[in-house]
Amino acid sequence: MKKGKIGIWAIVLIVIAVIAIWFIGARNNFVRMDEQVAGQWSQVETAYQRRMDLVNQLVSTVQGDANYERGTLEAVIKARSEASSVQLTGEDLTEEKIAAFQKAQDNLQSAMNRAITLTVERYPELHATEAFQNLMTAVEGSENRISVERQKFNDSVKKYNQAIRLFPGSIVANLCGFEKKGYFTSSEGAEKAPEIQFDL
């Protein structure tokens, strides 16, 4: 009789130990993935910061070498200010906050594109300068880096979100407070093909 009770208790303790080890392992895995998302977010921020730094170069280059249109450059400066005011941390990466960040960054990109287009159209002599050409190369490289870092971020968010939502890991995620992270999405209107017109 005593041997039977000891055997049952041993089995119960082994089951509890296995569940505890699994729980701890699952939680630690979620922490690692959460940190991966936060680390990738910092890479995204670095790429966007490079773009913001280029705004100052764009404004200086255009102001210094052309009879610039003041309103266009003021729009770029204002968009940069608004974009830099939207700050997120690794813990704030909800869909709503990512969307607000993305909208501010899209507005900055749009303002920069308008300024560059206006400069190229109205000031061909500036467009031909080495400083402007170097700046355009830097802007292009910056946009490519942003695209790559956003994709890497979305990949790490996907892995994390899947892990916390799949059973049985979802039990651990819910008990420990791990929440779904937001993705970068395509910009509004990106589904429409751009119109290209040639003046003949």
Image (tube, rainbow, N blue to C red):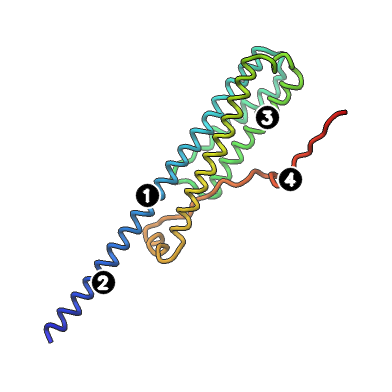
* Position of residue 127 measured from the top left corner of the image (x, y, whole percent): 70, 18
Q: Amino acid at mark 2?
A: Val
User: Who comes first in sequence, dot 1 or dot 3?
Assistant: 1
Q: Are marks 1 and 3 in contact (CB under 8 Å)?
A: no
- For label 3, the SS is helix
Circle 2 sits on which residue?
Answer: 15
Q: Please tell me which residue is depicted at 76% across the width and 19% down the height of the picture.
A: 122
User: Who comes first in sequence, dot 2 or dot 4?
Assistant: 2
Specify the quadrant that holds the C terminus.
Answer: top right
> Which image quadrant for residue 3?
bottom left
Callout 2 environment at 10 Å: few (<14), some (14 to 19), or many (20+)?
A: few
Circle 1 sits on which residue?
Answer: 32
User: Who comes first in sequence, dot 3 or dot 2?
Assistant: 2
- For label 1, the SS is helix
* Position of residue 153 measured from the top left corner of the image (x, y, whole percent): 50, 44
Q: Please tell me which residue is depicted at 58% across the width and 45% down the height of the picture.
A: 99
- For label 2, the SS is helix
Query: 48 or 11: nearer the eye?
Result: 11
Q: Are marks 1 and 4 in contact (CB under 8 Å)?
A: no
Callout 4 environment at 10 Å: few (<14), some (14 to 19), or many (20+)?
A: few
Q: Amino acid at mark 4?
A: Lys
Circle 3 sits on which residue?
Answer: 113
User: Who comes first in sequence, dot 4 or dot 3?
Assistant: 3
Distance, label 1 to label 3, CA atoms, is 38 Å
